[in-house]
Image (cartoon, rainbow, N blue to C red):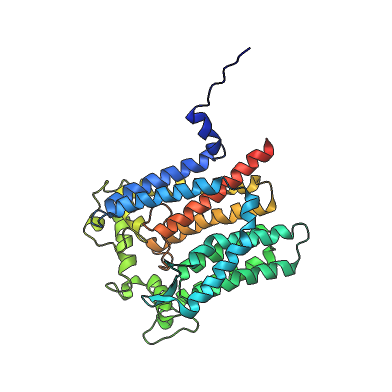
């Protein structure tokens, strides 16, 4: 008696690799990637191969997402301590003999030139999620204190470089883990209240605090100038305030419906500084208007809500904390970038996810998406 066995088709062989992909999350990323490619094509029209490079970076990020999505969260947890240790060690090495560019010491040569602070964007939430997972069910105030120290060390080293944008992203990711782990509101509210009071006093006494010759303690001169420029961009309209003023002009000129694809005058007459990187949101706003902005913001909100939903459904404390903090990275990227371009936050050099040009940031986003996909897949495996 003979039997015939048919070979599985190519589709059947590769289907299991995509079975764990979260459809809604992938759809949100697809919409943002399309917006990014359209905007880069228009804003990067005179930047040589910038559009092609942006598309290539997206493909690299997609490949990384695919690979990381196949790694179970348990194996990701095993990488937490080594990755964090290597990241902090490299930050210390940067402080000692790093490479200085444009007044900032952020890079180190290890055969290739790298920026170690980028490692901590993923290593920090991994490390803190691992820390709280190991203490699940018996968390004490001391555990939160240790977590705060683990967060403070790399953030302090990055601020010293100085790199406020990256420090803010890592601080947000780390604080998200600590908050989701159960930190009391009694410890969270006082710093927020003090911060709001500080902002109010800064606005009230701005003429005195930002007067020529006035120097603030702790902050570098350029950091002080960024804050003063935020409060009054017209103080130096052709210098420090130029970025913010041109960004707001571009956003306003887009109106409700936008000027149309490839029709942005501020963009194509090169009035928008850094129009393919930090200020690409201004170029997008000019060409696609308020309606385009609402669609873009809705896509980001959907991505964040989907990430938080994955966190809520995750099977372990480690996975829940990691998914929640990684999701907050996307929120912080988008909120800070749109805020600084719109003139409501200081300019700190944070890219807009999937829209801004930049290979390193795109790789980080790909890793973050892969982690979310991995956690979503682990939930399905547990349920089945």
Q: Residue furthest left?
A: 269
Of residues 106 and 325, the one drawn nearer to the viewer in this rendering: 106
- Horizontal and vertical percent position of residue 47: 26, 57
- Horizontal and vertical percent position of residue 161: 46, 75
Q: Left or right: where does residue 324 sit relative to residue 181?
A: left
Residue 354 against residue 235 in the figure, above or below? above
- Horizontal and vertical percent position of residue 339: 43, 61
Residue 326 against residue 4 in the figure, above or below? below
Q: Residue furthest bottom?
A: 213
Q: Residue furthest front?
A: 1
- Residue 305 shows in this picture: no
Of residues 177 and 7, the one drawn nearer to the viewer in this rendering: 7
Q: How many numbered marks have been drawn onto this rendered protein structure?
A: 0
Q: Quadrant of the C terminus?
A: top right
The residue depicted at 52 percent of the width and 53 percent of the height is: 368
Q: Residue furthest top?
A: 1
Q: Quadrant of residue 351?
A: bottom left
- Residue 325 shows in this picture: yes
Of residues 336 and 47, the one drawn nearer to the viewer in this rendering: 47
The residue depicted at 35 percent of the width and 49 percent of the height is: 55
Of residues 264 and 164, the one drawn nearer to the viewer in this rendering: 164
Q: Quadrant of the N terminus?
A: top right
Residue 114 against residue 69 in the figure, above or below? below
The residue depicted at 46 percent of the width and 69 percent of the height is: 110
């Amino acid at each position: 008696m003979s039997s015939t066995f048919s070979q599985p088709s190519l589709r059947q062989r590769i289907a299991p690799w995509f079975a764990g992909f979260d459809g809604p999350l992938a759809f949100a990323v697809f919409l943002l990637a399309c917006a990014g490619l359209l905007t880069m094509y228009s804003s990067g029209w005179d930047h040589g191969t910038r559009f092609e490079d942006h598309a290539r970076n997206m493909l690299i990020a997609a490949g990384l997402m695919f690979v990381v999505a196949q790694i179970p969260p348990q194996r990701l947890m095993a990488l937490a301590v080594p990755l964090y240790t290597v990241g902090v060690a490299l930050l210390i090495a940067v402080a000692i003999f790093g490479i200085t560019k444009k007044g900032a010491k952020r890079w180190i040569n290890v055969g290739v030139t790298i920026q170690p602070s980028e490692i901590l964007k993923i290593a920090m939430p991994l490390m803190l999620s691992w820390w709280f997972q190991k203490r699940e069910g018996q968390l004490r105030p001391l555990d939160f204190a240790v977590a705060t120290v683990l967060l403070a060390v790399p953030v302090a080293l990055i601020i010293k470089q100085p790199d406020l944008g990256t420090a803010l992203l890592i601080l947000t990711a780390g604080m998200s883990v600590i908050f989701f782990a159960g930190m009391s509101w009694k410890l969270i509210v006082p710093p927020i209240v003090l911060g709001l009071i500080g902002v109010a006093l800064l606005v009230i006494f701005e003429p005195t605090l930002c007067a020529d010759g006035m120097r603030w303690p702790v902050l570098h001169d350029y950091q002080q100038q960024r804050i003063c420029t935020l409060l009054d961009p017209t103080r130096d309209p052709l210098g420090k305030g130029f970025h913010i003023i041109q960004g707001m002009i571009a956003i306003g000129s887009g109106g409700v419906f936008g000027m149309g694809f490839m029709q942005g005058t501020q963009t194509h007459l090169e009035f928008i500084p850094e129009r393919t990187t930090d200020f690409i949101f201004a170029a997008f706003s000019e060409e696609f208007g308020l309606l385009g902005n609402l669609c873009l913001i809705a896509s980001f909100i959907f991505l964040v809500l989907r990430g938080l939903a994955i966190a809520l459904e995750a099977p372990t404390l480690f996975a829940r904390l990691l998914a929640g903090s990684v999701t907050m990275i996307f929120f912080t990227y988008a909120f800070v970038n749109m805020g600084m371009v719109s003139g409501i936050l200081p300019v700190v050099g944070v890219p807009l996810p999937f829209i801004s040009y930049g290979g390193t940031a795109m790789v980080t986003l790909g890793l973050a998406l892969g982690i979310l996909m991995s956690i979503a897949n682990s939930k399905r495996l547990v349920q089945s």
